[in-house]
Image (cartoon, rainbow, N blue to C red):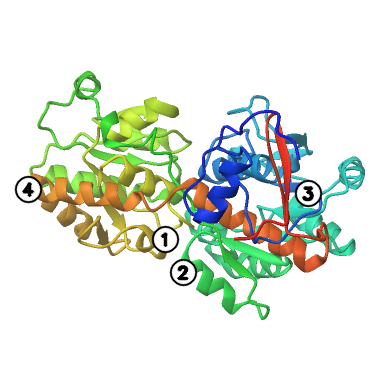
């Protein structure tokens, strides 16, 4: 056992005194290990398939990139990612990215559709010889990769990130929803394990699987970016808001399926009732032109990232989230962490995060009058608004990335153990982070 240098990870939380004693005595002051977890004889090779890994930033690929980084740091995994790519990348990818042939999706050209698993990609995949395959999109690429894994008895994990079947009605394709639902059911049933982001989806998807192998992989929030301290009175003034103006925000990708119709109607009704609302719209997307036409007084930030995004979100007072299509609702959690009062559609994903009347207000999803009444309530009572925002910020603390990513890693270990792959002869766990790589033998809590 050797250590090049201490790991830059400090993960003492959750380990008992014996684990910490071993860590201290052996010199692993800042290193993490998972005693008692299924053992791996070497770092695994992971093939991840995505419909959009880094050509356009969204909540799904942010979670996947975090997962890949976690796999590399905690398990020393080699991760090869197969995904469509665009002319420019939205950010640098984690892992080794392999571009697969794709075409722009008609009507939504910012997204790309992979054209299955062509011969040269199959050859690359075979040469990589993954120990486990992870599918994150139910597209042609994911379906073909799933069949490839099944034909070679490679453990297969799928993760659910998007309720694609709910999008169709926004594009005149309501008739296709039953077809989409059947395809999705077949796709998610193909895998050995299915990862879902909420308890509601855990219950829903378990019904369709006789093996019960559905596991929770929730999401986290970066509290260094999203927190009330990012609120900036100077920035608010620069956007034309006075100190006491209650700023009502829409925070999402600007696309039809995020409920922009309901948001537009709600703002118009508030203005008609005598509330001089100038909404703050944080995000970018193809529906921006429509929002600009319908809400000419709105303030548009465009696409923001990092602390600039955290500042814009924390500088709002109320967030309206009318989307009925969320699998998790990353932006709701981020706004909660920033100390913003939430008014959301009453959906299973929202109920996973928001306690109605305590950390936010939930409305019947298509009832504009309910959104208007909720916003009126929060504008009328500053104390009510601030108490709700503080409760939301406190509740967001339960959603940490390390915990959620560890849940996903546990499923990887479970899948590998069930398949008999990489099973060590003793309780041993690989860890790697940069130059620090080591193995612990025979450790148990």
Q: Earlier in the sequence, mark 3 or mark 2?
A: 3
- The answer to whether residue 73 is above or below residue 367 is above
Frontmost of labels 3 and 4 is 3
Q: Secondary structure at mark 2?
A: helix
Mark 3 lies on residue: 44
Q: Foreground: 267 or 412? A: 412
Residue at 87 percent across and 43 percent down: it is 128
Q: Mark 1 Cα within 10 Å, few/some/many (few <14, many 20+)?
A: many
Residue 275 rendering spot, x and y as whole percentages: 10, 41
Residue 303 seen anywhere in this rendered image of the structure: no
Q: CA distance from mark 2 to mark 4?
A: 34 Å
Disc 2 to disc 4: CB gap under 8 Å = no
Disc 2 to disc 1: CB gap under 8 Å = yes
- The answer to whether residue 294 is above or below residue 145 is above
Q: Secondary structure at mark 4?
A: helix
Mark 2 lies on residue: 200
Disc 3 to disc 2: CB gap under 8 Å = no
Side (left or right) of 438 relative to 108: right
Q: Earlier in the sequence, mark 3 or mark 1?
A: 3
Residue 284 rendering spot, x and y as whole percentages: 44, 33
Mark 1 lies on residue: 349
Residue 234 sits in quarter: top left
Residue 188 seen anywhere in this rendered image of the structure: yes
Q: CA distance from mark 3 to mark 2?
A: 31 Å
Q: Foreground: 66 or 206? A: 66
- The answer to whether residue 228 is above or below residue 443 is above
Q: Mark 4 Cα within 10 Å, few/some/many (few <14, many 20+)?
A: few
Q: Earlier in the sequence, mark 4 or mark 1?
A: 1
Mark 4 lies on residue: 380
């Amino acid at each position: 056992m050797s250590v090049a240098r201490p790991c830059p990870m400090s993960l003492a939380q959750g380990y008992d005194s014996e684990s910490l004693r071993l860590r201290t005595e052996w010199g692993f002051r800042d290193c993490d290990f998972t005693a008692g977890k299924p053992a791996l004889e070497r770092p695994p090779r992971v093939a991840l398939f995505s419909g959009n890994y880094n050509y356009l930033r969204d909540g799904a690929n942010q979670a996947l990139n975090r997962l890949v980084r976690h796999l590399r740091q905690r398990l020393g995994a080699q991760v090869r990612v197969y995904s469509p790519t665009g002319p420019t990348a939205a950010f640098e990818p984690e892992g080794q990215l392999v571009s697969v042939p794709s075409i722009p999706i008609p009507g939504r050209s910012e997204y790309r559709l992979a054209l299955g698993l062509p011969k040269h990609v199959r050859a690359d995949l075979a040469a990589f010889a993954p120990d486990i395959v992870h599918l994150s999109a139910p597209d042609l690429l994911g379906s073909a990769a799933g069949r490839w894994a099944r034909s070679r008895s490679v453990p297969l994990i799928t993760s659910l990130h998007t309720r694609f079947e709910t999008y169709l009605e926004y594009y005149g394709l309501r008739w296709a929803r039953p077809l989409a639902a059947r395809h999705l059911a077949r796709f998610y049933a193909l895998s050995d394990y299915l990862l879902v982001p909420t308890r509601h989806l855990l219950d829903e998807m378990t019904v369709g699987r006789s093996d019960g192998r559905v596991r929770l992989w929730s999401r986290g929030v970066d509290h260094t970016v999203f927190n009330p301290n990012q609120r900036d009175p100077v920035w608010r003034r620069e956007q034309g808001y006075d100190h006491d103006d209650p700023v009502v925000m829409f925070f999402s990708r600007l696309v039809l399926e995020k409920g922009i119709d309901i948001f537009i109607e709600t703002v118009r009704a508030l203005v008609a009732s005598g509330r001089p609302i100038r909404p703050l719209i944080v995000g970018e997307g193809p529906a921006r032109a429509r929002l600009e036409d319908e809400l000419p007084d709105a303030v548009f930030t465009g696409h923001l990232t990092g602390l600039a995004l955290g500042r814009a979100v924390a500088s709002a007072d109320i967030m309206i989230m009318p989307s009925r299509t969320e699998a998790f609702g990353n932006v709701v959690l981020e706004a909660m962490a920033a100390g913003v009062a939430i008014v959301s559609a009453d959906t299973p994903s929202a109920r996973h995060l928001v306690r109605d009347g305590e950390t936010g207000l939930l409305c019947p999803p298509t009832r504009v009058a309910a959104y208007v009444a909720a916003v009126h309530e929060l504008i009328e009572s500053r104390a009510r608004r601030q108490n709700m925002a503080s409760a939301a910020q406190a509740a967001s603390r339960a959603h940490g990335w390390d915990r959620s990513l560890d849940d996903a890693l546990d499923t990887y270990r479970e899948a590998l153990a069930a398949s008999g792959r990489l099973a060590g002869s003793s309780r041993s766990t690989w860890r790697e982070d940069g130059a620090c790589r080591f193995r612990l033998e025979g450790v148990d809590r």
